[in-house]
């Protein structure tokens, strides 16, 4: 019974992070500045990693952690690439 309760708690936490990601999607679309949009997209990527990790524990599927790790690396590389292209000789966009 305790294991099933913990599983439900992890899944509920994942659902709450999905709701947070939907709220952040609004910030990514509306803006008002490019930096706000970039930060929102980065946080959505980080939330996706957390959601996958919570689902891995809640559903007892270890391969979700592998997917979360790969997604975290891609999210990091995306943040570095966008930062490189938006910075122009000491100034930001």
Image (cartoon, grey):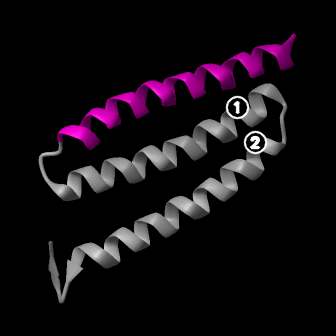
Percent of width and height locating residue 87: 23, 78
**Residue under pointer 2:** 64
For the point 25% across and 50% down, the residue is 37
Percent of width and height locating residue 39: 31, 54
**Residue under pointer 1:** 55
Q: Secondary structure at mark 1?
A: helix
Q: Quadrant of residue 35?
A: bottom left
Percent of width and height locating residue 50: 59, 42
Q: Which range is magenta? A: 1-30
For the point 50% across and 69% down, the residue is 77
Q: Quadrant of residue 28?
A: top left
Q: Secondary structure at mark 2?
A: helix
Looking at the image, is 2 positioned above or below residue 85?
Answer: above
For the point 67% across and 34% down, the residue is 54
User: Is 82 on the left-hand or right-hand side of 55?
Assistant: left
**Marks 2 and 1: in contact by CB < 8 Å?**
yes
Give the spatial CA distance, label 1 vs label 2: 7 Å
């Amino acid at each position: 019974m305790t294991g099933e309760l913990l599983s439900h708690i992890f899944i509920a936490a994942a659902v709450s992070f999905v709701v947070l990601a939907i709220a952040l999607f609004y910030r990514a679309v509306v803006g008002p500045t490019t930096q706000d949009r970039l930060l929102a997209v980065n946080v959505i990527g980080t939330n996706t990693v957390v959601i996958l990790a919570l689902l891995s524990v809640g559903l007892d599927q270890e391969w979700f952690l592998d997917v979360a790790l790969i997604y975290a690396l891609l999210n990091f590389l995306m943040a570095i690439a966008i930062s490189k292209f938006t910075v122009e000789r000491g100034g930001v966009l």
